[in-house]
Image (spheres, rainbow, N blue to C red):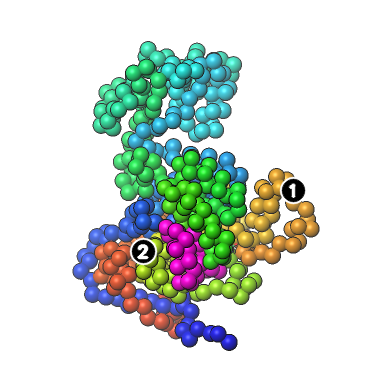
Amino acid sequence: MNIRPDLGLTFADVLLVPKRSAIRSRSAVDTSTWLTSDIRLTIPVVSANMDTVTETQMAVAMAHAGGIGILHRFMPVERQAEMVRRVKRTESHVVEHPVTIRPQATLAEARVRMEETMIGGLVVTGEDGRLLGMLTTRDVLLTQDLSATVESLMTPRQRLIVAAKDATLDAARLTLHTHRIEKLPLVDADDRVVGLITAQDIIKLQEHPQATKDGKGRLRVGVAVGVRSSDLERAATCIEAGADVLVIDIAHGHADHVIEMVKMLKREFPRSPVIAGNVATADGVEDLAQAGADAIKVGVGSGSICTTRIVTGFGVPQLTAIADCAAAGAKLGVPIIADGGIQTSGDVTKALAAGASTVMIGSMLAGTEESPGAAVIREGRRYKVVRGMASLTANVARKEIEQQGEVDPDEIEKVVPEGVEALVPHRGAVRDILHQLLGGLHSGMSYAGASTLEALRQNAEFIRITGAGMHESGAHDVSVL
Ligand code: XMP
């Protein structure tokens, strides 16, 4: 029998040994890190590409907080691309392609467009792209005649304040303030609309100073893709919509078809970073990195909703997997994302101390307001649903999307799930959960005497603990109120 001599360890098997610290305040630490070699995050947290975790709202909340969200792939490609567009439109220095409408359109059509795009101010343009007016929610709020034309309701061009296409942000801010307006169309010499600056975007810039943004001031977002030939098209459509990073989402990422897909994506889209996974070994990291992966996701069977280890017998306890993979990643200059099994802020600190650059979180975020799906009430308490992407219901939902209709019961019986569906307590807003997680991480860094994550890695000394040590670690021998 080929058996490794060491014990596989996970988060609860170890503690970090306190070190001499010069850090006086928990706020004096820097948690910034690299997702890939060209995407910097101010907090080392990524929301999981699961259909009960990351859609538009989660991606926006994560990017606002300084992390990033990865949109799951279990939906038609157009829907995924639309989510990318929505995240990208949330804020930017300049809205490059403002939502437009023609003057002949009806109020009914304008309302649908506002709802579909979640945009409250439509730019009215002619066939030639020239600016004819603006229509805002205020213009349509009290009107009952749904057949009224946009032209009859809009603020016409002659009453609009506009700016030249190269107006600076400061000049735009002054114009918006001076005229007490909320939207400033940018026009070229022929009066064609080339952009829009909004007061809201300028305010948001100040509200989320540590947000994760691209060069145009738009929030960053990632998209998950698979390994089929149709996934090349998915990648192309999402990149066109503005996706910042592609994540190849395969349970056993150390596989020939994943290596091929990494190469193909790097060849087709050389400017897009590619994250590949999941793996649990140094060999897995080396093969994916050599294929061109810009970061690697680590975790096989570690997730809270995973049953892969039970169903297949395979996996590596997560802390050992992170340490092995991070050692290989460090040699190759490829960051590691510790994916799955994070239950506490202490686990985040341990994952980063073991060498991960970021952590990916699923079920802890599934209970937030920003996760997809409504809250359910059970015995007077609020919960939300989380499901493994290899669970029975997720498999059925996937087949329904692929077949565009109901799935044959015989096919359902053939599914061998490697995940479960579960309820998690409703936990409020993403920012509240992140506040707790990062507060714990900041404190952990001060115990390590580390003002940066790099120093945390270097200073880290783990100690294995016994069951008695673990018992001592939580509240014990008292009745917790
Ligand atoms: P947490 O513990 O944060 O883990 O909820 C999230 C990660 O779990 C993985 N995942 C699965 N693994 N079967 C599995 O074996 C599944 O059905 C499944 N669904 C998600 C995934 O890596 C995710 O990021």
At 54% from the left edge and 31% from the top edge, which residue is drawn?
Answer: 115
Q: Residues within 10 Å of mark 1 (few under 14, many from 20)?
A: few
Q: Depth check: 221 or 289 in front?
A: 289
CB at disc 1 and ligand 1 closer than 8 Å: no
At horizontal 55% and vertical 18% (from top left) the residue drawn is 105
> Residue visible at 43% across and 73% down?
324
Residue 301 among magenta residues: yes
Per the image, label 1 sits on a secondary structure element best described as loop
**Residue 44 appears at what percent x and percent y?**
38, 59
Q: Is residue 215 visible?
A: yes
- Answer yes or no: is residue 359 visible: no
Q: Is residue 154 above or below residue 477?
A: above
* 286 relative position to 440: left or right: right
Name the quarter showing ligand 1.
bottom right
C-alpha span from label 1 to label 2 = 46 Å
- Establish if 199 lies above or below 1: above
Image quadrant occupied by the C terminus: bottom left
| Residue at the image point whose x is 41% and y is 73% from the top | 323
28 or 49: nearer the eye?
A: 49
Element type at mark 2: loop
Residue 403 is inside the magenta segment: no
Q: What residue would you read off at disc 1?
A: 406
Instruction: Please name the amino acid that badge 1 sits on.
Output: Glu
Amino acid type of the residue tagged 2 in the rendering? Gly
Examine the rendered structure and indicate whether residue 124 appears above or below residue 442: above
Identify the residue position indicated by label 2 in the image. 333
Labels in figure, total: 2
Among the 4 quarters of the image, the one containing residue 358? bottom left
Query: x, y (%) of residue 211?
Result: 35, 47
Q: Earlier in the sequence, mark 1 or mark 2?
A: 2
Please give the range of residues in magenta: 276-303
Other-residue count near label 2 (Cα within 10 Å), few / some / many at <14 / 14–19 / ≥20 = some
